[in-house]
Image (spheres, rainbow, N blue to C red):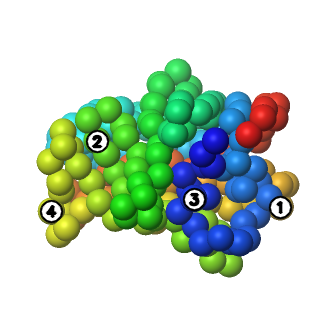
Amino acid sequence: MHPDPFLQALPKGTELPEAVRALHSVCGQYSGRCTIKAGGGMLVALALRCARMPPDGRDVEVKVSITRNGAGWLWTRDFGGHTTRSRLSFDHRSNCVRERFGPVSIWLKPVSSNHLLSIQILGLKFLGIPCPKPLLPRSKTIEWQDESNRFRFDVSAEMPVLGPLIRYQGWLTSDHEQKG
């Protein structure tokens, strides 16, 4: 069995808050709330639609299902009825996570520091065409455990020239544990 791609991309022995490690260790169902803010403009809207990102919303119910599919993991996120699916796998060549949203593939590097898991964007391809480095989106995505022992997330991306693409932030708790 292949461990979660984020755990594979971190150095051996990396310490993570329990809620973060748990979400990245087992398949399961998670529920919580979040706020979503999409960037403005026609090009940003097109980019978000291609990646199947959710629309704006405040205090939106969110459900996340994490399952395995061979060497990859499938994440299905339901943002108040809008479904976003991605397939995550560990890319051995770059030692990072590859996440695919429809025609968009993103290479992500997790970094653990001060009880936070930060996720940086290293590369992007749209329909197999690489994004030039100067146009590569930047992310300030972090995951952590709050004082109520909930998994917290703050996912954001912005693109040079276009500006903010999307930001969604909130919390999740496990509906029930499933086997890893």
Residue with the mark numbered 1: 147
Q: Secondary structure at mark 3?
A: helix
Task: Find the distance from the CA under tag 4 to the CA under tag 2.
Answer: 14 Å
- Mark 3 vs 1, N-terminal side: 3
From where the camera sits, is residue 84 visible? yes
Residue at the image position 45 percent from the left and 37 percent from the top:
87
Q: Secondary structure at mark 1?
A: loop
- Mark 3 vs 4, N-terminal side: 3
Residue at the image position 60 percent from the left and 45 percent from the top:
2
Q: In this orientation, which residue lies closer to the viewer: 116 or 95?
A: 95
- Mark 2 vs 3, N-terminal side: 3
- Mark 1 vs 4, N-terminal side: 4
Mark 3 or mark 1, whichever is nearer to me? 3
- Mark 2 vs 1, N-terminal side: 2
Cβ atoms at labels 3 and 1 below 8 Å apart: no
Left or right of 41, for residue 116: right
Residue at the image position 27 percent from the left and 54 percent from the top:
124
Cβ atoms at labels 1 and 4 below 8 Å apart: no
Residue with the mark numbered 4: 132
Quadrant holding the N terminus = top right
Task: Find the distance from the CA under tag 2 to the CA under tag 3.
Answer: 22 Å
